[in-house]
Structure formats: structure tokens, C-alpha cells
Amino acid sequence: MIPIAPPHYRLFAAIGAVVLGTATAHAVEFNEQTLAALKSPSPAERQKFYRMLPQLPDLQKPAAVAQLQEARAYHKGRVLESFAAAARGDSAWGRFVKAHTAWREAVATLLTNIRTDWHKDPKKVADLTREIGQCARLRDHVRQAATAAQQTDYARMLAATGVLLELDRVVAFVEGNAGTFQQTPAETLALAVAGSETEAQLKTLAAWPATLKRYAEADEANAKCRWAKEEQRRFAAILNEARSTVDLTPLRLDEQLSAAAVGHSKEMVAKGYFAHESPVPENKSFVERARNAKFDGGPSGECIFMGDRSPTAAYGGWWGSDGHRFIMFGEANTLGVGHGGTDHWTLNTGNKKWP
């Protein structure tokens, strides 16, 4: 998100320039002329209204606040109209809205297809591969459009709501709350669009940096796992890139869950079997293996693969196998994976509370 400048208080300073101790309160006629001054896009015109306020009798302050609020509603309407026009047009904001809508629609379709049992039909798997590639391109368009929108139209939106913030400050002054008024430009913008179509669009844009940060933090944490082998970190990167394409929670590597996975890979080779169920009673299921490895979360799934030590090959094998694909793209936040120097891979997913 672009930086937001701190609020300016020139308005309060201008109002406070009138020395209240020597000013004489006098009645003001609030009419169409005073309202027109407040509705003006010119700050100088609005200042004509503001200069009357320090000398205003207390009995007339409610009338002043009423005109300020009527003017605010007028300016808010103009702001919302400009936002809606920008979303429909060929602006950075409009391009972001369209790109994000297209990506989310593609994600909904792709997730349904990813979680459908195609009985390992090669044609369907090839279709899925094309779909996720297209979805990745749409996500990249969203990234580019979000950056442009934050740097241009979002900044202009904040500027456009400046008059609303100005009027809110003046209301606070008239009502005697100037000393506690702390509303920011971003908060004013959020209040202006509340209940409109722009509100959801603005929340989407505001949330986008957090979405990117969430994946970056997971990738950084995985890269820093000194206990992990290069192939384990590489597999985590491959899977998280695919999960980010469909907006799923990134997976963080866990040492204990990975120890359970590696242990199962080694045991399958040592005992000459290839199955999820171990012939060793205390290691029978992936849940028991995770507990034996002292994994401090809840294990949720397991994939096994044999024939190649490459993380790309393991991912590709599981991508083309319906049940395994369901696990890779399931609701989880933790990953355990490894082959332990063999050509047998094991993947475990789970959920735990991360710091």
C-alpha cells in the first residue's frame, strides 16, 4: 500500500487565528448562499464559511453543523461518482478491478477442476496444466494492475476525499471535539465508500499487499530452514507457487513433520514396500508417524511417490494423480516432505499455529 501522509491541521490553525477572547459572537443567516460556499470545489470559497464559526453563538452551532453535513453528503456523492466512473473506464483502477474479477472467476473454476476426480485421465490432466498456467498469467496481471492502481488512482482517491476530511474536522471544531479528532485520510475514504460497490473493490486493493506479503514470508521462512535439504526447499517453493495461483494459504516447512515424511520414505525402501500403511505397528498411519516425530500440529494428509529424486518429478506425479492433487491443494498451512536420499518421496500436510 502506498504511504499515507499524516493529516494537516492548517484548517484548525486558520479558524483559531480569530482571537475568541476579543471576538463578539454574532448571528449568521444560514441559507443557499452559505451552503453554496460549502459545496464549492474551491477551498477559498469554503473558507468564507469557516471564518464565521469562531464567533458563532452556541444556539446556531447545530444549524452550522447541519449545513456542513449537507455539504459533506453533496461532496461524497461527487466522490462516489468519480470512483464508479474510474472502475468502469480504462484507468489503472478500472484495469485492476477487471483483472482481479477475471482472476477470481478463473480461480473458482480451476479449484473445482483441481478437486475433481478425473480418474488420472491424461487429457484432463493436460487441461488442468493449461488452466493453471492461464490462471498464473491472470494473477500476474492483477499484481501489475494493483501496483499501478496504488500509485495512481488510489492516491487520487485519497486526495478526492480530502474535502470530506476537511468538513469532518470543521464539524469536530464546531462541536468542541477538535482536540480529539484523529481521523486519517484512509479512514475517511473507507467511510465514504461504505455500502457502495467501491467498498469491496477498495478492500480488495487494500488486501492485495497483505496477500503478497503472506506468500513472501512463507517463502522466506522456508528458505531459512537450515535443517532442510535443497530438494525439500525446492519442492515447497514449487507447491507454494501453484497454491498462490489459486489463492490458497502458503505452506511452511516443519522440521518434525518433514522428519516423519523422510522416515516413511526411508522405511519403504528398507522394507521393500510402497504404501501409506506401514508394516511397523507403531508407524502404521501418517497420523501416528507425525505424532512419533513430535509434530505439534494436526496432520491432514499424505502423498507418496517413487522413481525419481527430482522435486519437479514428485510434484508432477502428484499433480496427475487425483487423490494426491486433492491433498496438495487442500486446506492446510504446514508441509513435511522429503525422500531421505532414496527415490521414494513422502509428503505430509497439516495445520499448526505458527508464530
Image (cartoon, rainbow, N blue to C red):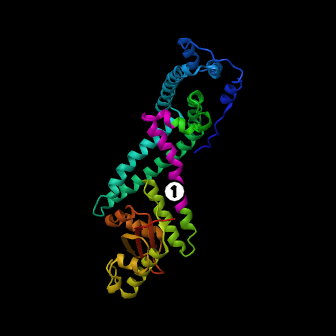
Taking the image as shown, residue 326 lies to the left or right of residue 168, namely: left
Can you say which quadrant of the picture contains the N terminus? Answer: top right
Residue closest to the eye, 311 or 92: 92
Q: Secondary structure at mark 1?
A: helix
Location of residue 152 in the rendering, given as x and y in whole percent from the top left corner: 59, 36
Residue 100, above or below 120: above
Residue closest to the eye, 220 or 328: 220
Which residue is at a point 50% across and 64% down the rendered structure image?
237
Q: Main secondary structure of the magenta part?
A: helix
Number of labels in the image equals 1
Which residue is at a point 43% across and 50% down the rendered structure image?
135
Residue closest to the eye, 96 or 70: 70
Residue 314, above or below 243: below
Location of residue 240 in the rendering, given as x and y in whole percent from the top left corner: 47, 61
Residue closest to the eye, 114 or 52: 52
Q: Residues within 10 Å of mark 1 (few under 14, many from 20)?
A: some
Location of residue 235 in the rendering, given as x and y in whole percent from the top left corner: 48, 68
Task: Find residue 345 and report its image quarter.
Answer: bottom left
| Bounds of the magenta segment | 190-218
Say whether residue 207 is magenta.
Answer: yes
Which residue is at a point 58% across and 68% down the rendered structure image?
224
Which residue is at a point 52% across and 51% down the rendered structure image?
210
Taking the image as shown, residue 260 lies to the left or right of residue 284, namely: right
Query: Can residue 343 be seen in the rendering of this structure?
Result: no
Location of residue 279 in the rendering, given as x and y in whole percent from the top left corner: 32, 85
Type of the residue with mark 1: Arg
Residue carrying label 1: 214
Query: Can residue 188 be seen in the rendering of this structure?
Result: yes
Say whether residue 91 is magenta.
Answer: no
Taking the image as shown, residue 218 lies to the left or right of residue 20, namely: left
Residue 30, above or below 136: above
